[in-house]
Image (tube, helix red, strand yellow):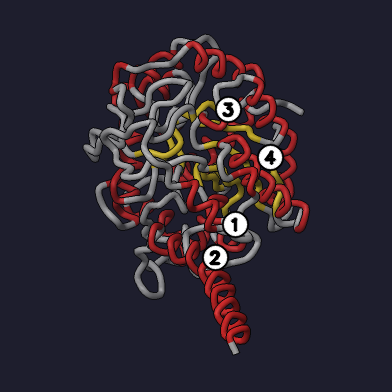
């Protein structure tokens, strides 16, 4: 009798554990990535949809790989997966790997030593044990997930590592093929773990974009949200990393970087960074948005600015609010330096998911932008930048 009770209790524990590890991560994701879209979506005219369908669209930032779901399958949570991106006519999507996030994360100040939110998430998702306590391995595990997806369905998903790969994707789409180009990026340079040799490891794994910092100061230098404040710039190690990225043809992303770090990067010969997901401070005075003079300086070096979709950076939660920030960006840096940087699946809200991106095209038309301007913002500027920056082969 006792043995039977013990077996029953053990079975209940096993069932409970299976339920927890199966359901809890999805519950967390659903809560952290709300979709603020009205039932039936935002209204889109036939004219706007027709324009949207002939655009080449690119986006600088999605954190979908963090959530350990098959991105080849459409799900009813979050903002992106391959089916929804293709439905939204996205040609190129940057998928960034998130490896560390401080507990109590905020836009003002975070400690490097704060407990990490990503460690329990990776354990709860039952990711490979090697990734539980190594930021480098955590980035590589997410890269491996994208590579597996490409191998499973190469006709729908191709990882872009070179300019030649970019041309292949764009040519295929011009021929009517439904294929998504994916660029692998890192949300911050801390997966390097202070070792320049790890830049080679990430590059070999397919990484072609890397942010320098995230919500905390790291070995590369100061974060916009770190303890060092605006005076903490690029470290000697960070300087070596930036030079190494330039030599490799990697995209340098200064999103989340401190103002002094941005200035230090801009002073390096050959540096042409992007600001991948942001708003315009003069339009929306959030501490998450860099001051306008720095944004203008990034554009002046040939970089592009990716406008985000979430309320904290555009000061609103409708497609029109995003369009307003895009217009503010054009007014600040010119129409040749503005692009999209949604921050989809990055623990943010969004007024539409990738499948309903045509709502933004409608909003840009309603705001009075020309077809030429919309074409540039929605992807033309990003494609030009990538064609000039990525390694040739």
Earlier in the chain: of badge 1 and badge 2, it is 2
Residue 85, can we see it? Answer: no
90 in relation to 257, above or below: below
**Are discs 1 and 2 less than 8 Å apart at CB?**
yes
Could you say which is closer to the camera, residue 250 or residue 338? 250
Depth check, front residue: 322 or 374:
322
Which dot marks residue 160? 4
Residue at 41%, 23% (x, y): give it: 298
- What residue would you read off at disc 2? 21
User: Is 307 located above or below residue 75 in the figure?
Assistant: above
x and y percentages locating residue 350 in the rendered image: 38, 56
| Residue of label 1 | 126
Q: Which comes sooner in the sequence, label 3 or label 2?
A: 2
Helix, strand or loop at label 1? It is: loop
Disc assigned to residue 13: none
Is 42 placed left or right of 5 in the picture? left
Camera-nearest label, 4 or 2:
2
Q: Are marks 3 and 1 in contact (CB under 8 Å)?
A: no
- Neighbour class for label 3 at 10 Å: few (<14), some, many (≥20)? many
Q: Earlier in the sequence, mark 3 or mark 4?
A: 4
Residue 186 found in image quarter: top right
Q: Secondary structure at mark 2?
A: helix
Foreground residue among 307 and 261: 261
Q: CA distance from mark 4 to mark 2?
A: 33 Å
Quadrant housing residue 285: top left
- Give the residue pinned by disc 3: 192
């Amino acid at each position: 009798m006792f043995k039977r009770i013990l077996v029953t209790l053990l079975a209940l524990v096993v069932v409970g554990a299976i339920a927890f590890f199966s359901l809890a991560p999805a519950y967390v994701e659903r809560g952290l990535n709300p979709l603020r879209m009205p039932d039936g979506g935002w209204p889109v005219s036939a004219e706007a949809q027709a324009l949207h369908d002939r655009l080449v669209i690119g986006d600088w930032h999605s954190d979908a790989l963090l959530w350990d779901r098959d991105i080849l399958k459409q799900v009813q949570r979050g903002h992106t997966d391959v089916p929804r991106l293709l439905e939204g006519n996205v040609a190129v999507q940057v998928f960034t790997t998130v490896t560390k996030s401080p507990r109590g994360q905020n836009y003002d100040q975070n400690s490097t030593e704060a407990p990490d939110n990503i460690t329990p998430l990776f354990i709860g998702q039952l990711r490979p044990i090697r990734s539980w306590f190594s930021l480098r391995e955590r980035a590589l595990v997410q890269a491996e997930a994208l590579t597996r997806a490409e191998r499973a369905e190469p006709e729908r998903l191709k990882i872009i590592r070179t300019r030649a790969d970019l041309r292949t994707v764009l040519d295929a789409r011009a021929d009517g093929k439904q294929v998504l180009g994916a660029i692998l990026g890192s949300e911050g340079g801390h997966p390097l773990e202070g070792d320049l040799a790890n830049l080679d490891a990430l590059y070999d794994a397919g990484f072609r974009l890397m942010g320098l910092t995230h919500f905390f100061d790291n070995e590369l230098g100061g974060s916009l949200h770190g303890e060092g404040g605006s005076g903490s710039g690029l470290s000697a190690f960070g300087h070596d990393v930036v030079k190494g990225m330039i030599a490799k043809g990697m995209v340098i992303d200064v999103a989340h970087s401190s103002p002094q770090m941005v200035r230090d990067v801009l002073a390096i010969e050959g540096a042409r960074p992007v600001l991948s997901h942001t708003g315009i401070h003069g339009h929306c005075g959030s501490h998450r948005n860099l001051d306008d003079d720095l944004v203008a300086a990034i554009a002046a070096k040939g970089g592009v600015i990716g406008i985000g979709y979430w309320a904290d950076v555009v000061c609103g939660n409708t497609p029109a609010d995003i369009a307003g920030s895009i217009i503010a960006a054009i007014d600040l840096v010119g129409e040749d330096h503005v692009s999209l940087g949604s921050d989809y699946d990055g623990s943010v809200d969004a007024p539409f998911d990738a499948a309903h991106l045509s709502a933004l095209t409608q909003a840009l038309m309603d705001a009075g932008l020309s077809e030429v301007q919309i074409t540039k913002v929605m992807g033309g500027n990003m494609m030009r930048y990538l064609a000039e920056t990525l390694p040739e082969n």
